[in-house]
Amino acid sequence: MVYHYTGNTQNGDPDTLNTTCLKDQFFTFKSDNTCSYTNFNCLDQTTTGTWTLTENKLYFASDMVAKDTVAGGSTSTVKPFTNTQIVTLGVYSLVLQTGDVEPNYSATKKRTVTRYGFIKQKATTITN
């Protein structure tokens, strides 16, 4: 979801990303501080990088670079998780916010925040 704000006031309804995407998207974090994202923005790709947590463990940063689509359908590269706020870290879920998520901002500043939600997937076994 993409939210638009002026200061702390949300402007309009949020935009939903990838509503027709049928690809599984995986964000994987490893204990050696590497990470990967498969099918970012519903594009066939696996991007990798490293990640670090802030001292208070409320934000993390990743240097991964991914392909993204822009207006007109062309592609560009982005660093989608350079400054990322951890909103929820549950046993089976993770919600991240990126974009203009700094804790202090002007009441008149226009901000854009992108929110990603993830759920843990468990492999299933089918038996006959």
Image: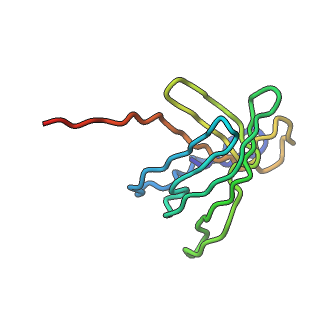
- Answer with left or right where residue 56 lies relative to residue 23: right
Q: Position of residue 102 (x, y in %)?
A: 81, 40
Farthest-out residue, top = 91
Question: Compared to 81, does 85 lie above or below?
Answer: above
x and y percentages locating residue 113 in the rendered image: 68, 46
Residue furthest to the front:
32
Q: Considering only vertical position in the picture, is 76 above or below 42?
A: below
Image side of residue 23 versus residue 54, left or right: left
Q: Position of residue 69 (x, y in %)?
A: 58, 67
> What residue is shown at x 51% (from left), y 51% (from top)?
16
Between 83 and 115, the one nearer to me in the picture: 83
Residue at image position (68%, 59%) is 65
For the image, the number of numbered tags is 0
Q: Farthest residue in the left direction?
A: 128
Question: Residue 90 placed where, x, y %?
Answer: 56, 24
Q: Is residue 105 above or below residue 87?
A: below
Image point (27%, 35%), residue name: 125
User: In the image, what residue occupies the spot 55% across and 74% down?
Assistant: 73
Q: How is the image coloured?
A: rainbow
Q: Nearer the viewer, residue 115 or 79?
A: 79
What is the quadrant of residue 107 in the picture?
top right
Q: Quadrant for residue 23, please give it.
A: bottom left
Give whichever of 2, 34 is nearer the camera. 34
Q: Quadrant of the C terminus?
A: top left
